[in-house]
Image (cartoon, rainbow, N blue to C red):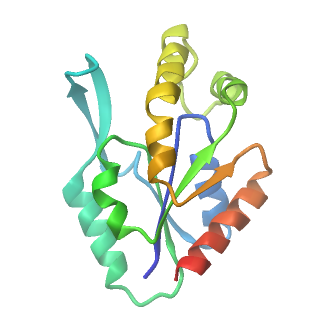
Amino acid sequence: MVAILVTGMSGTGTSTALAELARRGFRVVDTDYDGLSVESWCAEESRPEQLWREDKIDALLARHENSSPEEPLFVGGCVSNQGRFYRRFAAVVLLSAPVDVLLERLTTRTTNAFGKSSDDRDRVLADLAAVEPRLRAGADAEIDTRAPVAEVADRLVRIARGAS
């Protein structure tokens, strides 16, 4: 069974893309919910960070690998330990957008408070410089999310079908 990791920095549209895929009937899992992630202290950066609960992600992927449906599983998330699971995904897809687009989305979104404060925006800018290049290096594909969400979802589906 094909599992696709959809990753990207805050504001790139991962949740929006997953919602569109779910609306189309695909199986999606946002790892920000249902106890799949946990906040942990990052001593290197002196701030909290999100990590996948590796036992739960392992179980999620094992269930999918052992299931019979032909449709792919789209898993969304961006955490520092996701690379440990890259070999379990048929493809890792980075969603990206220019910094001005990200900051505008973070300022105006209503589903999440992160990104509204100047401290949050400073963190986003720092993460873009430090984290996004690592995500890009580990990605099999990249999608610019300035495109309409339907086009982003279409590309994700094509990637999944090409990986199966």
Point 52% across, 61% down: residue: 140
Q: Is 143 situated left or right of 90 in this image?
A: right
Q: Is 56 situated left or right of 147 in this image?
A: left
The number of callouts visible is 0
Q: In which quadrant is the N terminus drawn? A: bottom left
Most extreme residue toward the right, as rendered? 148
Point 28% across, 19% down: residue: 45
Residue 40 point in image, percent of width and height: 23, 32
Point 47% across, 87% down: residue: 69
Compared to residue 24, the image places residue 127 above or below, namely above
Residue 44 point in image, percent of width and height: 23, 22
Residue 93 point in image, percent of width and height: 54, 57
Compared to residue 31, the image places residue 154 above or below, namely below
Question: Foreground: 51 or 21?
Answer: 51
Rendered image quadrant of residue 146: top right
Most extreme residue toward the bottom, as rendered? 68
Point 46% across, 45% down: residue: 135
Q: Is 41 situated left or right of 13 in this image?
A: left
Question: Foreground: 22 or 102?
Answer: 102
Compared to residue 85, the image places residue 147 above or below, namely above
Compared to residue 17, the image places residue 99 above or below, namely above
Most extreme residue toward the top, as rendered? 118
Residue 13 point in image, percent of width and height: 63, 44
